[in-house]
Image (cartoon, rainbow, N blue to C red):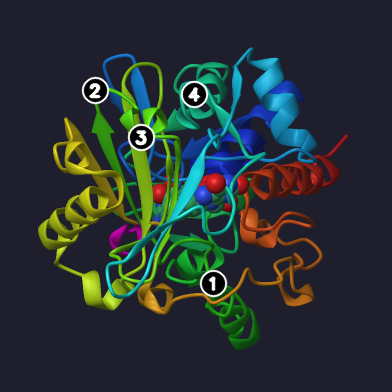
Amino acid sequence: MSGSVAIVGGGLTGLALADRLHAAGIDFQLFEARDRLGGRISTARRGADWFDLGPSWFWPGQPRMAALVQRFGLNVIAQYSEGAQLYETAKEEVIRDRGFASMQGSLRVHGGMGAIVEALASALPLGSAETGRAVQSISADGTISFADHGACTFGRVVLAVPPRVAAEIAFAPELPHHVQSALCGIPTWMAGHAKLVAVYDSAFWRDDGLSGDASSQLGPLAEIHDASATTGGALFGFVGVPATARAGQRDAVIDASVAQLGRLFGARAMKPLAVYYTDWAEEVGTAVAADRAPLMHHPAYGRPTVLDPAEGSRIYFASSELAPEMGGYLEGALAAADEAAGWVLGMMPG
Ligand SMILES: Cc1cc2nc3c(=O)[nH]c(=O)nc-3n(C[C@H](O)[C@H](O)[C@H](O)COP(=O)(O)OP(=O)(O)OC[C@H]3O[C@@H](n4cnc5c(N)ncnc54)[C@H](O)[C@@H]3O)c2cc1C
């Protein structure tokens, strides 16, 4: 196996890299720690409906995302944004038409972002992407060993995991201190967030002239948008309560969020058919303890030069956070995969 490539991590970066290597005829094996592929992409399914608990949007001007959805024939839908936006003050006062539809122009994928994951995975050779395979240690000779059991040696190892998550893997020999601290210093985009989706039998707020967009000084949801899928209606919100304060408070956060949706959108909003909630700060494989500190702005991502692979190194760090452009976003994950593929192909003999 020493001529082949190990891809550690089956998020969008890892899957897109696998896709690139497959197209180039390079032998690879992808190992994903979770029991599912997609990483931060996570789409709940309910009958014909689909609800994104990770990323919901891509945007015009992101050519790799546009090409991917086109290649797989996925339908793109505009974020619903017709009607008034609501604003909730800290004193429970609801003001109509304050501000503007904040995500107008954002694009969703019919079937959710999970549809991209499914399409990429189904285009890979059978058995080339293994789930439930957490990589525990990596040696400089390309040997990776797994948390459950076993080890394999590869010619190249691409770590398609967020930098802080990569820093938790045991390297032999240990990574130089400046490399380790560079990895730990790069926050994982959105890892400290939690997202809630409330599902209804119809998008009844639209009948009241509301877009579903709302922002709140009171919370627990700080920002709310329409998340309606194929049937019925849905609203989603980003939880504004910091990760440390909401830890272990799942039921309380859900109850308070549903009550808040009632304050904003009326009594019908207090009777969802289903509620989905993911606290990404609690997700092993995405967040580390440092990610509980809220990020105040989108970091200036990109690969610090200390993370450039040394001459002859078999190990390469990827992930959206290290992308040459659009770091942190889905488009960044695809850009990171392109860059990693360039490294692999450039390194391959002949
Ligand atoms: C709530 C939320 C909302 C977001 N909204 C948007 C949005 O609207 N638009 C947008 O463009 N972006 C958004 N993002 C960011 C987007 O999700 C990421 O940019 C993208 O998914 C990153 O992909 P990735 O493959 O680089 O990393 P990840 O998706 O984090 O994938 C890394 C993978 O590595 C696996 N892994 C970790 N450790 C190991 C190990 N030791 N062994 C094996 N596998 C391992 C993980 O389980 C994971 O599957 C959002 C993210 C979140 C959390």
Element under label 4?
helix
Q: Please identify, in this view, whether the residue under mark 4 or under mark 2 is nearer the observer.
A: 2
Q: Please identify, in this view, whether the residue under mark 2 or under mark 1 is nearer the observer.
A: 2
Query: How far is disc 1 from disc 4 in space, using C-alphas?
Result: 27 Å
Instruction: Judge the density around disc 4: few (<14), some (14-19), many (≥20) Cα neighbours within 10 Å.
Output: many
**Mark 2 near ligand 1 (CB under 8 Å)?**
no
Q: Which residue does the numbered mark 2 point to in the structure image?
A: 201
Q: Please identify, in this view, whether the residue under mark 2 or under mark 3 is nearer the observer.
A: 3
Q: Which mark is residue 205?
A: 3
Relative horizontal placement of residue 216, taking residue 22 as reference (left or right): left
Query: How far is disc 2 from disc 3 in space, using C-alphas?
Result: 12 Å
Instruction: Choose the circle earlier in sequence order: 1 or 3.
Output: 1
- Which amino acid does the dot numbered 1 rest on? Pro
Question: Residue placed at 63% from the left, 54% from the top?
Answer: 320
Instruction: Judge the density around disc 3: few (<14), some (14-19), many (≥20) Cα neighbours within 10 Å.
Output: many
Instruction: Choose the circle earlier in sequence order: 1 or 4.
Output: 4
- Which amino acid does the dot numbered 4 rest on? Ala
Q: Which residue does the numbered mark 1 point to in the structure image?
A: 187
Q: Which residue does the numbered mark 4 point to in the structure image?
A: 115
- Asked whether 203 falls inside the magenta stretch, the response is no
Element under label 2?
loop
Relative horizontal placement of residue 3, taking residue 350 as reference (left or right): left
Magenta segment boundaries in residue numbering: 280-284
Viewer-nearest residue: 163 or 243: 243
Instruction: Choose the circle earlier in sequence order: 4 or 2.
Output: 4
Q: Is residue 71 visible?
A: yes
> At which x and y percent is residue 105?
67, 39
